[in-house]
Amino acid sequence: MKSPPGQKRPFPIATALAGIIQPVIHQPSALPLFLLLALLFVVFVILVELKILAYAYQKIGVGPRYVFGLMLLTLVGSHVNIPLYSIPVERIIPPHTVWVYGLPYEVPGGGQEGATLVAVNVGGALIPTLLSVYLLVRTRMWGRMLAGVILVSLVVYSLASIVPGVGIVVPIFAPPLVAAGAALLFAFRRAPPVAYVAGSMGTLIGADLLNLGRVAEMGAPVVSIGGAGTFDGVFLTGIIAGLLA
């Protein structure tokens, strides 16, 4: 259809852009280049995250030579559970995926029939506890760290949720904020180690230890102290709290 005389015809911008973009997308060399750039971006993000974690550990009080060994032990240890005891339960929740606080949690299968195994996670409980004891002995800030742990424990306990089949789950961003605030309040000039101890120990106590009496309600084949729903909270809380402080 022709435009009336004297009236300008609108320029087909969308058509022109499609004509420019389409050949670029379908060029054979574009896909390998895009994949290479994506790979470089992922490597860059990993390196940045490792540097941030290393910096956080050093701020907390861990020597540079031990940082990467400690991170490796923590991540590998997150897949290791040391059995403690078992509790008889009426039923075990079948395996499935459940979303809590915007994150997916896998309900595992297996385990004993009609019983929940209580275990301790190496990466999420044992290593943070040993590191907290080391920081406590090294800094000798007994009262300040104890006050921070109590405060974080109370807040985490009030926020912890029982997720059937998984165990105890806590929102991972609330504890670090509370731990950082407690560290700045109780030890402004030496906040990072206080933030780590208060964040990691407060999360373990408030989420897992204070809820051990409710294991029979969870219907999980395994309830791991410092595992599943609280590993992210313990690991990230200590690190993020140290950075914030």
Image (tube, grey):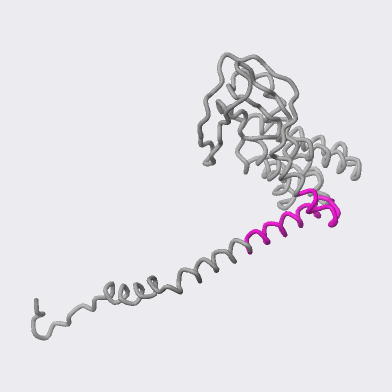
Residue 88, given in percent of the width and then of the height, sits at 64, 14
For this orientation, the residue located farthest to the bottom is 6
Residue 23, given in percent of the width and then of the height, sits at 35, 75
Q: Does the magenta stretch include residue 59?
A: yes
Q: Is residue 172 left or right of residue 55?
A: left
Question: In the rendered view, would you say 16 is above or below 161?
Answer: below
Please tell me in which quadrant of the rendered image residue 236 appears. Answer: top right
Residue at 67% in and 34% down: 227
Residue 43 visible in image: yes
Query: Depth check: 104 or 59 in front?
Result: 104
Q: Does the magenta stretch include residue 134?
A: no
- Provide the major secondary structure of the magenta segment: helix
Residue 20, given in percent of the width and then of the height, sits at 34, 77
Question: In the rendered view, would you say 84 is above or below 41?
Answer: above
Residue 18, given in percent of the width and then of the height, sits at 31, 72
How many numbered circles does the render carry? 0
Residue at 83% in and 42% down: 131
Query: Depth check: 94 or 176 in front?
Result: 94
Residue 215 visible in image: no
The N terminus - image quarter: bottom left
Please tell me in which quadrant of the rendered image residue 186 appears. Answer: top right
What residue range appears in magenta?
A: 44-71
Query: Depth check: 62 or 192 in front?
Result: 62
Question: In the rendered view, would you say 24 is above or below 225?
Answer: below
Please tell me in which quadrant of the rendered image residue 118 appears. Answer: top right
Q: In this view, does 159 lie to the left or right of 194?
A: left
Residue at 86% in and 36% down: 143
Residue at 61% in and 33% down: 169
For this orientation, the residue located farthest to the front is 28
